[in-house]
């Protein structure tokens, strides 16, 4: 009979594989000769926009598929989240800390932005800009950015990576390693400081409440806030410009 820890490790491994191959690398299927051209031909949009719209819908479909697979895996192992000793926060407490965590992340990113400015890094993330453009062309992408992405990333980087490390390493080693990996996977190395800060705070929230719900709430709020601001940046700028000096 498999021990609960071995079963949890196996579930974590399958979730990691799902995230990598279904969510991150599924787009390689489009390299099958003729497949991409066939799908693009079905999209009713200007030729210059078809590729981006395909990416948005592909990310959404395979993001939903990845999330379903992960939830099935978690449901089959009821002990998967029991990695901390002591009492877990209640659902209400977890949500409350998630909201607090959102503001902690905003504060952390402000500090990170000042650090980047001090060492000569210009503001503005290429990763955020590209996702915003996809969301403008295909609003369905907002679902991936604001909901699906944060849930999958918290499962992988907080429960699978941080949660696995915290069982054999100290808090700081587990937190830093998971945060750096989280930052690296966004492939925006110019602003790796900002992503690392987010990862550190999300790990702290998970550890503090012993509930993954906490970091999921904070992550969803952060991504939702960012995409709403980015999609309405021109309107917001006009509002700011219209205010008295």
Image (spheres, rainbow, N blue to C red):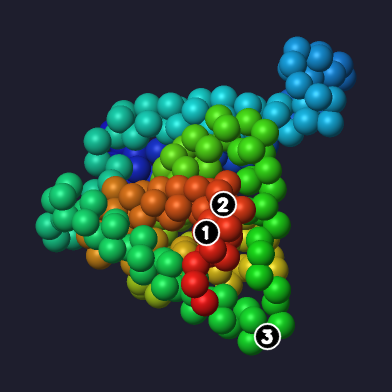
Mark 2: few, some, or many residues within 10 Å (few <14, many ≥20)?
A: few
C-beta proximity under 8 Å, tags 3 and 1: no
The relative height of residue 175 versus residue 223 in the rendered view (above or below) is: below
Q: Which residue is mark 3?
A: 119
Image coordinates for residue 217, horizontal then vertical, percent: 33, 50
Mark 1–mark 2 distance (CA, rounded to whole Å): 6 Å
**Image point 61% across, 53% down: which residue?**
234
C-beta proximity under 8 Å, tags 1 and 2: yes
Mark nearer the N terminus (3 vs 1): 3
Image coordinates for residue 82, horizontal then vertical, percent: 24, 49
Image coordinates for residue 72, horizontal then vertical, percent: 37, 27
Which quadrant of the rendered structure holds the N terminus? top left
**Image point 21% across, 56% down: which residue?**
96
The relative height of residue 172 versus residue 56 in the rendered view (above or below) is: below
Q: Is residue 35 visible?
A: no
Find numbered disc 2 in the image and state the secondary structure of the residue it sits on: helix
Mark nearer the N terminus (3 vs 2): 3
Left or right of 44 in this view: 236 = left
Q: Is residue 61 visible?
A: yes
Quarter of the image for residue 24 reads top right
Left or right of 86 in this view: 138 = right
Mark 3–mark 2 distance (CA, rounded to whole Å): 31 Å
Find numbered disc 3 in the image and state the secondary structure of the residue it sits on: loop
Q: Which residue is mark 2?
A: 235
Mark 1: few, some, or many residues within 10 Å (few <14, many ≥20)?
A: few
**Image point 57% across, 32% down: which residue?**
139
Mark 3–mark 1 distance (CA, rounded to whole Å): 31 Å
Find numbered disc 1 in the image and state the secondary structure of the residue it sits on: helix
Quarter of the image for residue 115 reads bottom right
Image coordinates for residue 197, horizontal then vertical, percent: 49, 70
């Amino acid at each position: 009979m498999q021990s609960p820890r071995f079963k949890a490790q196996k579930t974590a491994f399958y979730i990691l594989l799902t995230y990598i191959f279904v969510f991150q690398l599924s787009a390689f299927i489009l390299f099958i000769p003729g497949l991409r051209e066939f799908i693009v031909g079905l999209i009713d949009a200007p030729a210059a926009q078809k590729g981006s719209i395909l990416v948005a819908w592909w990310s959404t479909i395979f993001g939903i598929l990845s999330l379903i697979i992960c939830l099935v895996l978690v449901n089959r192992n009821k002990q998967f989240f029991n990695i901390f000793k002591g009492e877990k926060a209640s659902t209400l407490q977890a949500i409350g800390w998630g909201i607090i965590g959102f503001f902690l992340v905003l504060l952390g990113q402000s500090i990170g932005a000042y650090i980047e400015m001090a060492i000569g890094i210009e503001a503005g993330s290429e990763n955020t800009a590209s996702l915003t453009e996809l969301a403008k062309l295909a609003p369905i992408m907002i679902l991936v950015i604001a909901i699906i992405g944060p849930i999958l990333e918290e499962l992988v980087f907080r429960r699978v990576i941080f949660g696995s490390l915290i069982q054999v390493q100290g808090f700081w080693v587990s937190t830093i390693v998971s945060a750096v990996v989280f930052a690296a996977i966004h492939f925006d190395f110019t602003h790796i400081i900002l992503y690392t800060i987010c990862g550190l705070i999300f790990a702290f929230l998970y550890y503090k409440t012993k509930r993954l719900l906490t970091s999921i709430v904070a992550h969803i709020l952060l991504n939702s806030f960012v995409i709403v601001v980015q999609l309405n940046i021109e309107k917001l700028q006009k509002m700011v410009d219209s205010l008295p000096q």
